[in-house]
Image (spheres, grey):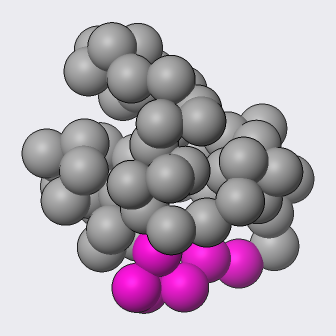
Amino acid sequence: MEIVVNLDVMMARRKISSNELAERVGITPANLSILKTGKAKAIRFSTLMALCRELDCQPGDLLSYRE
């Protein structure tokens, strides 16, 4: 069982680079990379809200559950 992060998919759909998204959201490119690769252990709701705002999506578009 795992949570899958689909951040890279949404970024490609919105045609936005990692550096641009990191700047808009207010996190470092390194932390965005950790989120994108699924290596993050947690995500703050404020970061999730900022990602959803900038990518014009819902949390379920970025995160999914897989058995």
Quadrant (top left/top right/bottom left/bottom right) for the N terminus:
bottom right
Q: Which residues are magenta?
A: 42-47
Where is residue 3, by image quadrant?
A: bottom right
Name the residue at 50% across, 53% down: 23
In the rendering, at what x and y percent does residue 7 appear?
A: 50, 38
Identify whether 13 is placed above or below 49.
above
* Circle count: 0
Residue 22 percent location from the top left of the image: 55, 50
**Residue 23 versus residue 8: which sits nearer the camera?**
23
Residue 63 is situated, as x and y percent measured from the top left of the image, at 46, 52
Q: Any magenta on residue 4?
A: no
Q: What is the quadrant of residue 66 in the picture?
A: top right
Q: Is residue 29 visible?
A: yes
Q: In this picture, is 43 found above or below 59?
A: below
Q: Residue at x 59, y 36 (%)?
A: 19
What is the x, y in percent for residue 33? 76, 43
- Which residue is depicted at the point 50% across and 23% down? 17
- Frontmost residue, 7 versus 1: 7
Residue for point 24% across, 50% down:
54
Q: Is residue 28 left or right of residue 48?
A: right
Residue extending farthest to the bottom is 45
Looking at the picture, tell me which residue is in the foreground, 53 or 61. Answer: 53
- Residue 6 appears in the rendering: no
